[in-house]
Image (cartoon, coloured by chain):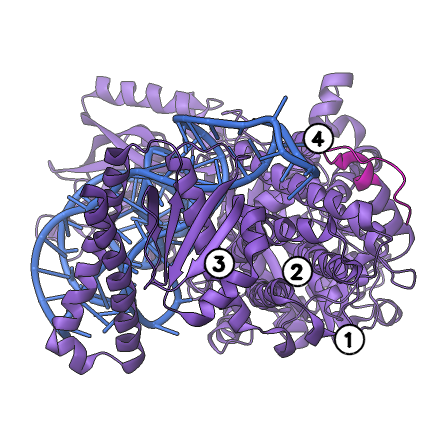
Amino acid sequence: MTTGTELPTTYSSKEAESKWYKIWEEGKYFKPKKGKQNKAFSIIVPPPNVTGKLHAGHALDITTQDTIIRFKRMKGFETLLLPGLDHAGIATQSVVEKMIWETEKKNRNDYGRTEFVKKIWSWKEEYGNVILDQQRAMGTSCDWDYLTFTLDPIPNLAVKKFFVDLYNEKLIYQSDYIVNWDPSLQSAISEAEVEHKDVQGAFYHINYQIKDSDEVLEVATTRPETLLGDTAVAVNPNDERFKHLIGKVAIVPLCNREVPIIGDEHVDLEKGTGCLKVTPGHDFNDFEIGKRHNLPIINILNLDGTLNHHCLEWQGMSCKEARKKIAKHLEELGILIDTKVHMHPVGHGERSGVIIEPMISKQWFVNVQAMSKNAVEMVENETTKFFPKEWENTYFAWLRNPKDWCISRQLWWGHQIPVFYCKDCNHQWASEINESQCSKCLSKNIFQDPDVLDTWFSSGLWPLSTLGWPNKEAMIEKKFDTFFPNSVLITGFDIIFFWVARMMMMSLKTHNQVPFEHVYIHAIVRDKLGRKMSKSLGNGIDPFEMIEEYGTDAFRFALASGAGYNRSINLDPDRIAGYRNFINKIWNAFRFIYPHLNAGSAIITDIQGLDHHERWILSELNTISKQMNHSLELYRYDDACSAIYTFVYDKYCSWFIELSKNILNGEDALKKSRRISVLKFIFKKILALLHPITPFITEELWSYLKEEDEGLLIIQDYPEYEAAWDFTTDQDQMNKFIEVVTAIRNLRQSVNIKPKDEVKVEIFSDNHELVVYFRNNAINFQELARVTDLKIGGKELTRPAKSIMSATAYAEIFLPLEGVIDLDDQIKRIEKELSKLVADHAKVESKIRNENFMKNAPEEVRIEVMNKDNGFREKIGSLKSNLVQFKS
RNA sequence: GGGCGUUUAGCUCAGCUGGGAGAGCGCUACCCUUACAAGGUAGAUGUCGGGGGUUCGAUCCCCUCAACGCCCACCA
């Protein structure tokens, strides 16, 4: 590499980012390759919706996934990060419907199914890839050849195969059932897609006349309009108040329907009036009661949520409107005897936002009882492990009490249910191929079930279908056996049941294997005030803006530094700016080395020949390598970030670079070239350690530092702990040196000595080794604290008269001053420090005086406390005796 | 109603199996010192939510109270 050009003082991220992504991708660096581990490591990216735009949550997904993948790739695993796209049934269909309505004033029926689905496909081709480019901008090292769309032929085949197999096992069945009906989508939606929100409503107390009697039953309801569908009134069989009425007949107001009064344990004596109107067609509990008592079901709603022909004069009204009018009418009849305001939860469609109507309809269900049991077991026995472990509870909560899964949706965009009906012989069968005749009577007069499957039905098979299942050739081509099960699934806690649980169930069903070994659940990204990011609040952080302003690396580092075992990350752009500064710091550390690029290799040939500081930095590097490895294995990105951050700032830049200046500016060619080697060597290790988190700047700088025969950083070995690089004595001594330098700087500031002014310093210590060590480091005191005249000796020597002083546990530090010293100031400073020390010392002393402590505490703790005690005594002693001198 | 979680410096959060309270940002002072002002050096700030208990010793373990958040269930 040449060193001819000047480098600017700030790093510009943009050019490096587009340059390196292209090089990596075109050089096929993201493709799986066998490494020294001879093991595979795979992650599938949770497929974002085709309608989606990258948001902060995706950015966190990518950062955490790509960091682990890059880490494992460097460690020598055969890595695969597998990208995908989800067709997102409801979301996508709505977007296109809306667009067509806005531009052409047409709805989907104007087009017909085939044409409309074509429309969606072309929309997908045009807009669906935006998010993939955004993922690239984040630096994700996906093998794009694996890109799979949930409606691709193989996932379609997987869906059909799974469906048909379970259909034939009778685990998929069709049933008249009360479902969550979304009137705006005109489709059933699953339990999990319903969001309960508290809504202000009222308890309407209505009198139901009892037939052939003067008695009335006071019923309480929040939905008076549904009385048109009542087919019973229920009381608790143990309720003394109403027991005698069981078996009699009540008359439903308005429609004057005669219905039985039944006894059912479900009725709560305390709630409402203790009398319950039963509407099996429009309430989940009532539906169950109805089954128990064989009640008829009356559906009073149209598919769009308006009241139907059963509803007399209220036919055609919305529920809301009818509720008001019916209440008024009942009031006029004198049988509405009370209305109490009441907050109660009401189900809303997660996507549409409208009130969900429980309604009877024919739907397809999966019986998940056996599958869920299996899925629970595999987490209990830790075949699949959650990080952090607490999320198991959420997973268990769902799977230990599973409800059969409603999988049919009345939409057009999605996998059509592979069930066929014969119009002639009424035969029904499931098939993986597109049938053209009845499998029984051979009639051509057949049709396919018009419904499509829940999106999560195909997502649930994702770990299998993305690797080719069930197509044998595709499975070989995509190396199914190598990459299944996946190593880890990384996602947010909001889809533990939607997705994680379903993948577990489905993979266990088809392969009797878990789909992934680890599940890392990352936090939700919130704004800096801890609020969820939402369109309505307008507080969303747009990853693109962040990348634009601070660079991808800074953004990734900010996300990673917040990702550990926590539940939310409150992302403040100021923090990203802080890490942008960190990135820039690295850039400038490189600028320090830059002029010396040709002056020595980055290879350390002779460890024994290193000097003290070189051994020290190597040892510090070693500590950090160990921490980084450990933290990343456990998905503690936050720990990894703070470890490397501290190392770069506090160790490498503040001390090692500073301590290298005199050598680099000096005359000793041998020392110089060795120091340059070490500077480069450590810097290259820093780049490697950081690469998984901040891939771009590290690859960019690597290109300057790498040897001819070295490849790109993305495929270098990840730094590991090396026993031979541990130099604890050097670390120890260096810490003492840092302590003294800091004390000198502190003294300088206390009397306002300018940074460039030179000073004399005298150090007194009874520790002989330390005296020698400090003597040998005189040049470094000069370099780091501008000490031009350093005297070091034992404590028996007399202290300089006109001076200010400070003390560590091992040494007294004096700064003699020529001019007048403000003694009072110095006395105050020392007294302040002294009082703090005395207070801290008191705590230690009380321990030592405590017999029980000395008796019970483990030896190493006792030794530690004794050492501290000595340290305090020395320091306090030094300060006290000098305070006496100052005062005299 | 059931469950989970949070409460530590002005803000955002670390603190692993109990043994002298930490980081980043912000703040203060002094510095354009030849890698870096997106910087350097030094510094200030905490009854570790309240109360009780276990222990020689509790930010950490147990109990309890309080505030806040999330998830699940529930349209009488």
Pointers 3 and 2 within a single chain: yes
Closer to the camera: disc 1 or disc 3? 3
The segment highlighted magenta reads: A1-18
Work out whether mark 1 precedes mark 3 in sequence or the reverse, and give the earlier one.
1
Residue occupied by mark 1: A481
Q: Residue at x 79, y 33 (%)?
A: A127
The residue labelled by disc 4 is A548
Circle 2 sits in a helix, a strand or a loop, which is it?
A: helix
Q: Name the chief secondary structure element in magenta.
A: loop
Q: Say yes or no: labels 4 and 1 on the same chain.
A: yes
Q: Dot 2 corresponds to which residue?
A: A68
- Cα separation, mark 4 vs mark 3, equals 43 Å
Looking at the rendered structure, the kind of residue marked 3 is: Phe
Whether pointer 4 and pointer 2 mark residues with C-beta atoms closer than 8 Å, the reply is no
Look at label 2 and name its amino acid.
Answer: Ile
For image coordinates 66% across by 70% down, the residue present is: A720
A275 vs A149, left or right, is: left
A407 in relation to A277, above or below: below
Image quadrant in which the C terminus of chain A is located? top left
The residue wearing badge 3 is A737
CA gap, disc 4 and disc 2: 24 Å
Circle 1 residues within 10 Å: few <14, some 14–19, many ≥20: few
State which quadrant residue A12 falls in: top right
| Magenta stretch holds residue A634 | no
